[in-house]
Amino acid sequence: MINRHWLDFEKPVVDLEKKIEELKAYPTDEPDAHKSELVKLEKKANTVLKDLYSKLTPWQVTKVARHPARPYTLDYVRHIFDDFVELHGDRCFKDDKALVGGLATINGESVVVIGQQKGRKAKEMGYRNWGMPNPEGYRKAVRLMELAERFGKPVLTFIDTPGAYPGVGAEERGQSEAIAASLMRMSTLKVPLIATVIGEGGSGGALAIGVADRVLMMQFSTYSVISPEGCAAILWKDGTKADMAAKALRINAEELKRMGVIDKIVKEPVGGAHRAPQVAFKNLKAELVATLKKLKTLSTEELLDARYEKFRNIGAFVEGK
Amino acid sequence: MEWIKKNLLAGNIQKNAKKFPLGLWIKCESCNGIIYKKEAEKKLDVCPKCQYHFRISAHTRINILIDPGTFQEHDAGVEPLDPIEFKDLKKYRDRMKASQKSTGLKDGIVSGDGLINGKRVMIAVFEFSFMGGSMGSVIGEKITRIVEAALNHRCPVIIFSSSGGARMQEGILSLMQMAKTSSVIARLKEAGLPYISVLTDPTMGGVTASFAMLGDIIMAEPKALIGFAGQRVIKETIREKLPEGFQRAEYLLDHGMIDMIVERKSMKETLSKLITMLT
């Protein structure tokens, strides 16, 4: 996953990173020929990136969250889990490629993993429907959650979607019902649930696999009731005001943590998960293992009561007369 | 929420009928018929020519359904805040205040208990004219409380939805109301208490994709627009013409998404009969 796609605000680092890449690729007999030069350049790039990424605007975070080289669900699954067996289909209509799931093991323990899946190259993007599930995806998710419940396995979900697919077939086959059913089913599932927002947490299509005991969020991810573009088009009557909408909606990890909607921010490497995916995998794995351990000390009753209260208490209002 | 832009904020209500203030006469936009206002009112705000069901206020709805003098409102004082200090072209606070002034309500829902043909029910009714019935923290909280009240008093729940979806102005908190309301409905189901969801024009987005589609019985008023995504978004995505009658109550019935379509004039009797059969 070499970064060949720079975001508009990354201008200051583009030349540095290009030069580093060129030097690394330069054929030479002496392996250390450019070492000192490389060290110097890498240090400089790192400083510039650190500075850039310490003050990202919410709209810039959105761009990082959508970066085409950002690790997707199956990347995390392959690198975090020792083993993974994918399971397919909703047993009603079809297998939704935009939402994947299966059995996996982490530190010797088996779990069920579920997540939206985006595609990286043009053909794969279509195959994955740009990470936008149809009702079948959510019905597969519920099927796998119920499988986890029957066998007493925790469920780990990975959220990364622009939203549930807005199509004629999706509506005809009950997109709303499928999402609603998943929300309701998660609220009473008798096993530990951990959700992680790894990229885009797009509206109801994201939340549909997000009713969890713990909600984690990768540092440069977003989670929102509507896309910044969609919100701008409606309220500003101008889709290009997405940067303003992103700010107004408060969709980045720190804001969401402050509002109590997510529990923990998982650190990403300098310059985002796509620059050093291994660091992102390692950080998330550590957090998942620690969180699982904590949740397993709770009885099923405690788990379900706490999950209910967690979502029951979200909201801002005053009690007037 | 996309729905709101097209049909509400842009003031571009397409096929949806709306009462036009022409004095004694009103125009039904569904059939374009000019009808005598008093006649429509006598028929519970239904167009006598095409049977289109006009949008009615929450209190009008309650008056039609609940036995006279038995309705007790709950949580009438629960008021919205502005948790993320949201401002687009207008401030959320200003939109909120304008809706409060025009409707006399604190937010877009009225909830309480009352009798339907002598049987006690917990009922919540959306007020569409309050910011397009959009669901923020207050609506989520009041729905949760009315369902919890039903759990405490062991009685059925009826929710009349009419909403453009989640309220963007409360950001992620409004999205989370979907999880909150669906969780309390799960408790109702475990307790074996009936929940009847009635979808009225329009029921879209985050409201449809949570408690509204979770009824033990789901019914709709004739021709009500019901869906997840707004039609403009779908059209832009698929770049094709939408099928005839798409996202209308009759279309959903045909696709197996709702149990029945019930006319306003028979709503009370239908609810009463179903509750008796289920309890």
Image (tube, rainbow, N blue to C red):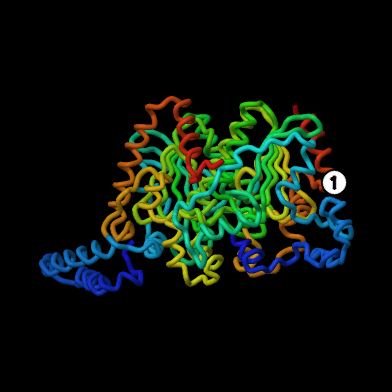
The structure residue drawn at horizontal position 64% and vertical position 31%, both measured from the top left corner, is B150
Position of the N terminus of chain B by quadrant: bottom right
SS category of the residue bearing label 1: helix
Q: Is residue A222 above or below residue A16?
A: above
Mark 1 neighbour density, 10 Å: few (under 14) some (14–19) many (20 or more): some
Give how far across and how far down residue B220 sits, in percent.
75, 48
Residue A109 located left or right of residue A309 = left
Residue B75 picture location, percent across and down = 60, 39
Query: Which one is in front, B29 or A192?
Result: B29
In percent of the image, x 55 and y 50: which residue is there? B136
What amino acid is found at the position of numbered circle 1 in the picture? Lys
Q: Is residue A94 visible?
A: no
Circle 1 chain: B
* x and y, in percent, of residue B156 in the image: 70, 32
Could you tell me which quadrant the C terminus of chain B lies in?
top right
> Is residue B212 visible to us here?
yes
Work out whether B226 lies above or below A60: above
Left or right, A168 with respect to A56, comes to right
Name the residue beneath numbered marker 1: B265
